[in-house]
Protein backbone atom coordinates (compact mmCIF):
# COMPACT_ATOMS: atom_id res chain seq x y z
CA UNK A 1 0.00 0.00 0.00
CA UNK A 2 1.37 3.42 -0.93
CA UNK A 3 1.83 6.01 1.78
CA UNK A 4 -0.80 8.75 1.99
CA UNK A 5 0.16 12.07 0.44
CA UNK A 6 -2.23 14.16 2.57
CA UNK A 7 -2.38 14.43 6.36
CA UNK A 8 -5.30 16.22 7.99
CA UNK A 9 -4.75 18.09 11.27
CA UNK A 10 -7.61 19.20 13.49
CA UNK A 11 -6.02 21.90 15.65
CA UNK A 12 -7.98 23.29 18.60
CA UNK A 13 -7.34 25.63 21.46
CA UNK A 14 -8.00 24.25 24.95
CA UNK A 15 -11.21 24.96 26.85
CA UNK A 16 -11.70 27.82 29.29
CA UNK A 17 -9.93 27.95 32.66
CA UNK A 18 -10.76 30.15 35.63
CA UNK A 19 -7.67 32.19 34.80
CA UNK A 20 -9.01 32.79 31.27
CA UNK A 21 -12.32 33.85 32.79
CA UNK A 22 -10.68 36.19 35.29
CA UNK A 23 -8.21 37.63 32.76
CA UNK A 24 -5.12 36.29 34.49
CA UNK A 25 -2.10 35.60 32.28
CA UNK A 26 -1.34 31.87 32.04
CA UNK A 27 1.46 31.06 29.63
CA UNK A 28 3.69 28.03 29.63
CA UNK A 29 4.53 28.28 33.31
CA UNK A 30 0.95 28.08 34.66
CA UNK A 31 -0.67 24.63 34.58
CA UNK A 32 -4.34 25.44 35.17
CA UNK A 33 -7.36 23.13 35.06
CA UNK A 34 -10.44 23.67 32.93
CA UNK A 35 -13.39 25.27 34.70
CA UNK A 36 -17.04 24.22 34.28
CA UNK A 37 -17.37 26.26 31.09
CA UNK A 38 -14.20 24.71 29.69
CA UNK A 39 -15.43 21.21 30.45
CA UNK A 40 -18.74 22.00 28.72
CA UNK A 41 -16.84 23.32 25.69
CA UNK A 42 -14.74 20.15 25.61
CA UNK A 43 -17.89 18.02 25.79
CA UNK A 44 -19.52 19.99 22.96
CA UNK A 45 -16.41 19.51 20.81
CA UNK A 46 -16.36 15.79 21.57
CA UNK A 47 -20.01 15.32 20.70
CA UNK A 48 -19.56 17.00 17.31
CA UNK A 49 -16.28 15.33 16.32
CA UNK A 50 -16.34 11.98 18.16
CA UNK A 51 -16.88 10.06 14.92
CA UNK A 52 -13.86 11.53 13.13
CA UNK A 53 -11.41 8.64 12.67
CA UNK A 54 -8.45 10.18 14.49
CA UNK A 55 -5.30 8.07 14.30
CA UNK A 56 -3.45 10.03 16.98
CA UNK A 57 -3.89 12.83 19.51
CA UNK A 58 -1.13 15.36 20.16
CA UNK A 59 -1.32 17.83 23.04
CA UNK A 60 1.00 20.19 24.83
CA UNK A 61 2.46 19.10 28.16
CA UNK A 62 -0.08 21.27 30.05
CA UNK A 63 -3.14 19.63 31.57
CA UNK A 64 -5.69 22.08 30.20
CA UNK A 65 -5.05 20.55 26.78
CA UNK A 66 -5.22 16.99 28.16
CA UNK A 67 -8.54 17.72 29.83
CA UNK A 68 -9.99 19.26 26.66
CA UNK A 69 -9.50 16.06 24.64
CA UNK A 70 -9.87 13.61 27.55
CA UNK A 71 -12.90 11.84 26.08
CA UNK A 72 -11.02 11.13 22.85
CA UNK A 73 -8.12 9.75 24.89
CA UNK A 74 -10.55 7.60 26.91
CA UNK A 75 -11.72 6.01 23.64
CA UNK A 76 -8.25 4.50 23.34
CA UNK A 77 -6.87 6.77 20.62
CA UNK A 78 -3.09 6.95 20.82
CA UNK A 79 -1.92 10.12 22.62
CA UNK A 80 1.40 11.89 22.80
CA UNK A 81 2.41 15.02 24.69
CA UNK A 82 4.75 17.40 22.87
CA UNK A 83 6.20 20.26 24.96
CA UNK A 84 6.84 22.01 21.64
CA UNK A 85 3.08 22.67 21.53
CA UNK A 86 3.09 24.48 24.91
CA UNK A 87 1.84 28.04 25.21
CA UNK A 88 4.39 30.82 24.86
CA UNK A 89 6.16 31.54 28.15
CA UNK A 90 5.02 34.99 29.26
CA UNK A 91 7.71 35.22 31.95
CA UNK A 92 7.01 37.82 34.60
CA UNK A 93 3.49 38.40 33.19
CA UNK A 94 2.36 34.94 34.24
CA UNK A 95 -0.08 34.70 37.12
CA UNK A 96 -0.86 38.42 36.97
CA UNK A 97 -4.31 39.82 36.37
CA UNK A 98 -4.74 42.27 33.53
CA UNK A 99 -4.37 45.88 34.71
CA UNK A 100 -3.67 49.17 32.95
CA UNK A 101 0.05 48.83 33.74
CA UNK A 102 0.28 45.21 32.59
CA UNK A 103 -1.80 45.89 29.50
CA UNK A 104 0.42 48.80 28.50
CA UNK A 105 3.52 46.60 28.79
CA UNK A 106 1.82 43.78 26.89
CA UNK A 107 0.64 46.09 24.11
CA UNK A 108 4.16 47.51 23.74
CA UNK A 109 5.56 43.98 23.41
CA UNK A 110 3.01 42.95 20.78
CA UNK A 111 3.57 46.21 18.89
CA UNK A 112 7.29 45.43 18.78
CA UNK A 113 6.43 42.07 17.22
CA UNK A 114 4.22 43.88 14.71
CA UNK A 115 7.33 45.88 13.74
CA UNK A 116 9.26 42.69 13.06
CA UNK A 117 11.17 42.52 16.35
CA UNK A 118 10.56 38.79 16.82
CA UNK A 119 13.33 38.28 19.35
CA UNK A 120 11.63 40.53 21.90
CA UNK A 121 10.06 38.87 24.92
CA UNK A 122 8.75 39.47 28.40
CA UNK A 123 11.34 39.19 31.17
CA UNK A 124 11.90 35.48 31.75
CA UNK A 125 9.65 34.58 28.80
CA UNK A 126 9.98 33.42 25.21
CA UNK A 127 10.15 35.29 21.94
CA UNK A 128 8.17 34.36 18.80
CA UNK A 129 11.40 33.11 17.22
CA UNK A 130 12.11 30.84 20.19
CA UNK A 131 8.57 29.43 20.17
CA UNK A 132 8.81 28.87 16.41
CA UNK A 133 11.89 26.66 16.79
CA UNK A 134 10.20 24.26 19.22
CA UNK A 135 6.95 24.31 17.27
CA UNK A 136 8.64 23.33 14.03
CA UNK A 137 10.36 20.45 15.84
CA UNK A 138 6.95 19.29 17.08
CA UNK A 139 5.40 19.59 13.63
CA UNK A 140 8.29 17.70 12.04
CA UNK A 141 7.67 14.91 14.54
CA UNK A 142 3.95 14.83 13.72
CA UNK A 143 4.59 14.81 9.98
CA UNK A 144 7.16 12.03 10.30
CA UNK A 145 4.34 9.62 11.17
CA UNK A 146 2.90 9.33 7.69
CA UNK A 147 0.69 6.42 8.69
CA UNK A 148 -1.36 8.82 10.84
CA UNK A 149 -3.73 10.24 8.24
CA UNK A 150 -5.92 12.27 10.60
CA UNK A 151 -4.70 13.75 13.88
CA UNK A 152 -6.15 15.91 16.63
CA UNK A 153 -3.87 18.60 18.06
CA UNK A 154 -4.81 20.54 21.21
CA UNK A 155 -2.74 23.57 22.16
CA UNK A 156 -2.94 27.22 23.24
CA UNK A 157 -4.05 30.62 22.00
CA UNK A 158 -0.93 32.68 21.34
CA UNK A 159 1.01 29.54 20.43
CA UNK A 160 -1.71 28.67 17.91
CA UNK A 161 -1.36 32.06 16.24
CA UNK A 162 2.40 31.62 15.99
CA UNK A 163 2.05 28.08 14.69
CA UNK A 164 -0.39 29.08 11.95
CA UNK A 165 1.96 31.84 10.83
CA UNK A 166 4.77 29.31 10.68
CA UNK A 167 2.76 26.69 8.78
CA UNK A 168 1.33 29.21 6.32
CA UNK A 169 4.76 30.85 5.88
CA UNK A 170 3.55 34.23 7.08
CA UNK A 171 5.61 36.68 9.15
CA UNK A 172 4.70 36.84 12.82
CA UNK A 173 3.42 40.41 12.43
CA UNK A 174 0.37 38.76 10.82
CA UNK A 175 -0.45 36.56 13.82
CA UNK A 176 -3.54 38.64 14.64
CA UNK A 177 -5.02 37.36 11.35
CA UNK A 178 -5.66 34.05 13.14
CA UNK A 179 -8.36 34.65 15.77
CA UNK A 180 -9.23 32.00 18.34
CA UNK A 181 -11.67 31.29 21.12
CA UNK A 182 -11.61 28.46 23.65
CA UNK A 183 -11.97 25.17 21.70
CA UNK A 184 -12.14 26.95 18.33
CA UNK A 185 -11.01 24.72 15.49
CA UNK A 186 -8.71 25.05 12.51
CA UNK A 187 -8.50 22.14 10.06
CA UNK A 188 -5.36 21.99 7.93
CA UNK A 189 -4.34 19.57 5.22
CA UNK A 190 -0.65 18.91 4.65
CA UNK A 191 0.43 17.82 1.17
CA UNK A 192 3.62 15.77 1.48
CA UNK A 193 4.43 15.97 -2.21
CA UNK A 194 4.26 19.77 -2.31
CA UNK A 195 5.39 20.37 1.31
CA UNK A 196 2.41 22.65 1.70
CA UNK A 197 -0.22 23.32 4.37
CA UNK A 198 -3.72 24.42 3.37
CA UNK A 199 -6.35 25.75 5.76
CA UNK A 200 -9.63 23.93 5.12
CA UNK A 201 -11.59 25.23 8.14
CA UNK A 202 -10.90 28.61 9.73
CA UNK A 203 -11.58 29.25 13.43
CA UNK A 204 -14.79 27.21 13.64
CA UNK A 205 -16.91 27.28 16.79
CA UNK A 206 -19.82 25.43 15.19
CA UNK A 207 -19.83 22.94 18.07
CA UNK A 208 -20.56 25.75 20.53
CA UNK A 209 -23.63 27.06 18.68
Image (cartoon, grey):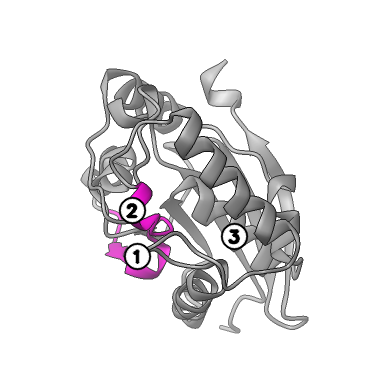
Mark 3 Cα-neighbour bin, 10 Å: few <14, some 14–19, many ≥20: many
Residue 130 locus on image (x, y percent): 49, 75
- Residue 132 appears left or right of 195: left
Viewport quadrant of the N terminus? bottom right
**Extent of the magenta region:** 77-93
Which mark, by number, is residue 162? 3
Q: Quadrant of residue 21?
A: top left
Q: Is residue 183 visible?
A: no
Q: Residue at x 42, y 24 (%)?
A: 44
Kindly check if marks 3 and 1 are in contact, taking CB atoms under 8 A apart as contact: no
SS class of the residue under badge 1? loop
Tag 3 secondary structure: helix
CB within 8 Å, label 2 to label 1: yes
Q: Quadrant of residue 162?
A: bottom right
State the mark number for residue 124.
Answer: 1
Residue 207 visible in image = yes
The first of marks 3 and 1 along the sequence is: 1
Q: Earlier in the sequence, mark 2 or mark 1?
A: 2
Left or right side of 77 for 177: right
Q: Position of residue 159 (x, y in %)?
A: 50, 56
Q: How many marks?
A: 3
Residue 72 falls inside the magenta stretch: no
Q: Residue at x 42, y 31 (%)?
A: 98
The x and y percentages for residue 42 are 37, 30
Amino acid sequence: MSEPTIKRLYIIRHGETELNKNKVVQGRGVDADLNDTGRAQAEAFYQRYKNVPFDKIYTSALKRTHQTVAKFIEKGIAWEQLPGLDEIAWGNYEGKKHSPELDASFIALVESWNKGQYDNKAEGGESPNEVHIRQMEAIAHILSHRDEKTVLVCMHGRALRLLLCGLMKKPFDQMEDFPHQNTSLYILDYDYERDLFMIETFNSTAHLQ
